[in-house]
């Protein structure tokens, strides 16, 4: 119970921290709305030429765009979450202080990132999504059960997203500069999550590969569950399996990295 209260407090702190950046949040809402408009008209033109591309009709393609804009910052699809801060703490040696805390390093940052993600969902994601739904024809369910299943997929996507970025951040224990790792994270996030194009529109073996990777758990799974293109239980299983595998990998890497911590400069 004590640990649960501790991590709940860390999550609440992460939520409050990002809630203080009101100007940045407003700018993010504007940016996501503008990019959503650009992508929607691009998708409409593409779907005019290729009707039912990837099994989606135009309304589903539009829904996918606005859901992506709602989850872009929520899931830190191109980075921008805790990973930059953790890599900097590793570089400066401040991570040694984190390791002395009466809390697990992985769980501490997971709780922190969940708080951040919840704020980004509510503060930055809801308005662009609502705008898209009001302005364009979309394919949204009318039953509460589907919406509840969708929210579960979003929570699981948060965990998968964290687990990927935690592994990237831990690379800082071996790299003098984590810029390259963060850039790889950015490129793979935008391409493999479906932010560029729904993964079910990728052809042949390439489509099979990207739909099997953990990034598919971030946007593609929630979108398909929301629009009735995937059964919730297999989607949950896919996301949970990747969450367990990646968190376990993070635990192993963390153990190897912290067995003998050597900070730069001494």
Image: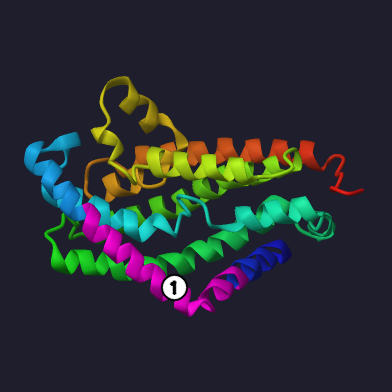
Residue 145 can be seen in this image:
no
Q: Which residue is at the front of the view, 65 or 91?
A: 91
Q: Is residue 63 left or right of residue 15?
A: left
Q: Is residue 193 left or right of residue 158?
A: left
Quarter of the image for the N terminus: give it: bottom right
Magenta stretch in the rendered image: 13-39
Q: Main secondary structure of the magenta part?
A: helix
Instruction: Determine the secondary structure under disc 1.
Output: helix
Query: Does 246 sit above or below residue 80?
Result: above
Residue at image position (81%, 60%) is: 102
* Residue 183 part of the magenta-drawn span: no
Q: Quadrant of residue 182?
A: top right
Q: Is residue 93 left or right of residue 206?
A: right
Image coordinates of residue 154 in percent, x first then y, are: 40, 54
Residue at image position (50%, 37%) is: 242
Q: Quadrant of residue 29?
A: bottom left
Residue at image position (34%, 43%) is: 221
Residue for badge 1: 25
Image coordinates of residue 255 in percent, x first then y, are: 77, 39
């Amino acid at each position: 119970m004590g640990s649960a209260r501790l991590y709940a407090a860390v999550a609440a702190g992460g939520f409050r921290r990002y809630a203080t950046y009101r100007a940045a949040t407003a700018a993010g809402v504007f940016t996501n709305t503008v990019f959503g408009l650009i992508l929607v008209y691009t998708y409409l033109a593409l779907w005019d030429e290729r009707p039912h591309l990837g099994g989606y009709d135009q309304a589903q393609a539009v829904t996918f765009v606005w859901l992506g804009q709602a989850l872009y910052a929520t899931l830190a699809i191109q980075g921008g979450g805790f990973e930059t801060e953790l890599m900097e703490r590793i570089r400066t040696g401040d991570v040694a202080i984190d390791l002395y805390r009466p809390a697990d390093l992985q769980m501490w940052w997971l709780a922190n990132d969940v708080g951040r993600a919840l704020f980004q969902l509510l503060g930055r994601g809801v308005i662009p999504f609502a705008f898209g739904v009001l302005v364009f024809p979309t394919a949204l369910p009318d039953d509460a059960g589907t919406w509840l299943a969708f929210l579960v997929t979003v929570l699981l996507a948060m965990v998968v997203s964290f687990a990927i970025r935690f592994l990237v951040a831990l690379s800082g224990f071996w790299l003098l500069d984590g810029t390259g790792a963060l850039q790889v994270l950015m490129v793979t996030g935008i391409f493999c999550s479906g932010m560029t194009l729904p993964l079910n529109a990728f052809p042949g073996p390439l489509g099979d590969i990207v739909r099997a990777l953990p990034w598919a758990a971030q946007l593609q799974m929630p979108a398909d569950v929301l629009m009735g293109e995937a059964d919730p239980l297999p989607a949950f299983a896919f996301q949970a399996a990747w969450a367990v595998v990646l968190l376990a990998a993070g635990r192993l890497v963390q153990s190897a990295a912290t067995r003998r911590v050597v900070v730069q400069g001494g």
